[in-house]
Image (spheres, helix red, strand yellow):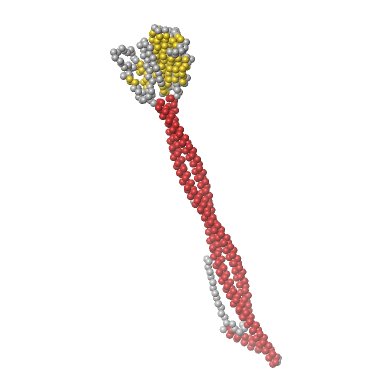
Amino acid sequence: MKSLVFVVLLLFLFERSVQEVDPKSERTQDFQQNEKENQSEQNVCDSCAELKELRDMVIEQRLGMKILTDKLEEYDLVLKSTQEQLRMTQYELQFTQYELKTTQDQLKSNQEELKSTRDELNSTKLELQQHQSELEALRSQLSQTESRVSKIEAKLEPKVAFSVGLTASLGPFNVETTVVYQDVFFNMGQAYNPVTGVFTAPVKGVYFITFTGFNYRVQEVDPKSERTQDFQQNEKENQSEQNVCDSCAELKELRDMVIEQRLGMKILTDKLEEYDLALKSTQEQLKITQYELKTTQEEQKSTQDQLKSNQEELKSTRDELNSTKLELQQHQSELEALRSQLSQTESRVSKMEAKLEPKVAFSVGLTANGNIGPFNVETTLVYGKVFYNMGQAYNPVTGVFTAPVKGVYFFTFKAFNYGGGTTALRMFHNQTCLLENWGYSSSHMYYSNTRIIQMEKGDVLYMKLAPNKQLYDDAGNYNSLSGFLLYTV
């Protein structure tokens, strides 16, 4: 249809041009007509060639623009996909970095807690070790103290002592008769029976028994002791070529179209290059971000592994700490019990040792100068020959024994007079006379006596010679005074 319109248009233009020509001559007209025909044919030929070339160019440019458009769309899709992937990767990186920071903070916190727990564990172990050492020392000390207690108890128990006398003269009897001492001065342990006159030993042991008798005779006693998307479109355009040239308007239109398409292709090419650069940049950024994400994920995994390891170590350390604390608590309880037991035992030992100490005993003789007395007044006897004086309780200058502790004491004396006459001695506790011995002989006389008494600390005991009476002593040590502490009370 377009070809037919084009031919009609050419014929109309040709007839119009013939009518407007004013021929001068027939030859001239023929020449001009031939020349116009030739020129027209030449113009048609040139226009057809140019038209064909332009049409081919338009088709080629359309195809190129189609390809560029498709490629641009494809780049756009790829760029959008890459940007979306980059955005997601950046988001994932940001999330991973946040998670990494959280994990690192948690790891740091766990490391600090682990360090603190280790320090606490080491401190607890050290304290436990100290407690174990102290416990062993206390056990040893307790064992030694209990051994001392056993020894002291063996010495202290039981407390048995008695001192008795007759109430009146006794005898004579036709048969051998048990002497009943009914005047009880002291009877610790109640082992002596004042009704029967019998002393019964309460435990197995060594006992010291002494007696004195008086009947005007001498009696002696012996003591012991932790999109890719892919898009493609193809288009074909078929158009028949005509040997008839097109109009100038169409030619101009085609030229404008070519220019416009070239401009469009330039814009598309620039845009495509811009997209390509953006895509490359985005891909490079994506690659960097993916590498950073991978590194961060690896670091996150490493941190998580380290965190898991630290958590396991922390759990193990906590378990060990709890176990050590439990053991320490048990040791502390045992230690407190041992301390209490040791304190009680030491208190018992102190009390027992207070009863055992001091060790007090003395034995003294009167003189080596012969006669002592007679004196006009009752005189304290000064026993100047010191045989033994443990505790220094006896004063050899004054003749007085002073009790260093409250307790039960045993005293005994022996007296001798040579040459006959009357002799009399008295034993005093403070200002109280405990006993009096006297006798008469025409030649010489021995006599002795014993007494067990309880004394307060500071109490005194001494012997006195009656007025106008005398004693005799020399290197034979006929006169003596002895005493010792039985036990404290």
In this rendering, position of residue 12 left or right of residue 350: right
Residue 164, x across and y down, in percent: 36, 17
Residue 278 vs 23, above or below: the answer is above
- The quadrant the N terminus occupies is bottom right
Residue 69, x across and y down, in percent: 57, 71
Residue 189, x across and y down, in percent: 36, 23
Residue 406 vs 300, above or below: the answer is above
Q: Is there any visible trace of residue 9 in the rendered image? A: no
- The quadrant the C terminus occupies is top left
Image point (53%, 68%), residue name: 229
Residue 478, x across and y down, in percent: 43, 13
Image point (54%, 60%), residue name: 89
Q: Nearer the viewer, residue 339 or 205?
A: 205
The extreme bottom residue here reads: 26
In this rendering, position of residue 126 left or right of residue 455: right
Q: Nearer the viewer, residue 16 or 89?
A: 89
Q: Quadrant of residue 462?
A: top left
Q: Quadrant of residue 484?
A: top left
Residue 216 vs 117, above or below: the answer is above
Image point (52%, 54%), residue name: 302
In this rendering, position of residue 316 left or right of residue 275: left
**How many numbered circles are shown?**
0
